[in-house]
Image (cartoon, helix red, strand yellow):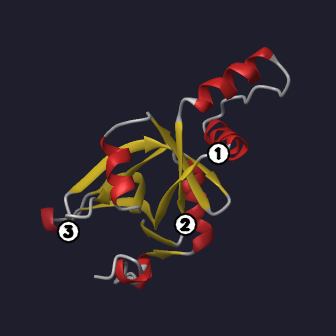
Amino acid sequence: MDETKPGSWYRPARRKDRTMDREGAVALLDRATFGILAMADRAGQPYAIPLSYGRDGDRICFHCATSGQKLDFLRDNPLAVLCVTEPGAVDPGETPCATTITYRSVLVFGRVFELTAGEAKLAALDAICRHHGIAVPTAGTPAAAAYAERAAQTVVLALDMEHVSGKARG
């Protein structure tokens, strides 16, 4: 696998009848409140972690502390996949093997990078807040100053949506 080419680490969906179009996949990203970010370090050690996020155009924004395993892995190897699911219901069949579960899921493949400029960090944090229905402080207020101060102490990351794959059943 050539880790410098994201297209080499995802394939077209096997079940074309369950494929979601990009619009449907993005709509699921916008509805969901969290996802699981999967990554691996250069040695191939896997790591996955649930996280909340916000979408800003073709980027998935999230934040973390200034140190930790997630940040270590992403600095070692920026390739990552975000998995977002929307579970459905059990659809019982006549036999156990004929039983299924309805679902919708999206995989977002891309590279993660750190946002370091103050305005870019704040815009990404604003996207996360808006995604979760949290009011962003009005510029020029004491709350906005506190928000900007806290943002300066936070690592803000973005996953470029290089490939989006959606799948649904039922």
Q: Name the residue under label 2.
A: 161
Q: What is the C-alpha distance between the residues marked 2 and 3? A: 35 Å
Residue 52 horizontal side relative to residue 73, left or right: right
Report the quarter where the N terminus lies: bottom left
Residue 98's tag is 3
> In x, y percent, where is residue 145?
74, 21
> In x, y percent, where is residue 101?
31, 59
Q: Mark 1 points at which residue?
A: 124
Seen from the viewer's position, the closer of residues 49 and 6 is: 6
Which one is earlier in the sequence, the residue at label 3 or at label 1? Answer: 3
Q: Looking at the image, which residue is at 42% across and 58% down?
A: 82
Label 3 packing within 10 angstroms: few (<14), some (14-19), many (20+): few
Q: Which amino acid does label 1 sit on?
A: Ala
Local secondary structure at mark 2:
loop
Front of the two marks 3 and 1? 1
Local secondary structure at mark 1:
helix
Residue 147 horizontal side relative to residue 153, left or right: right
Q: What residue type is labelled 3?
A: Ala
Report the quarter where the C terminus lies: bottom left
Seen from the viewer's position, the closer of residues 68 and 109 is: 68
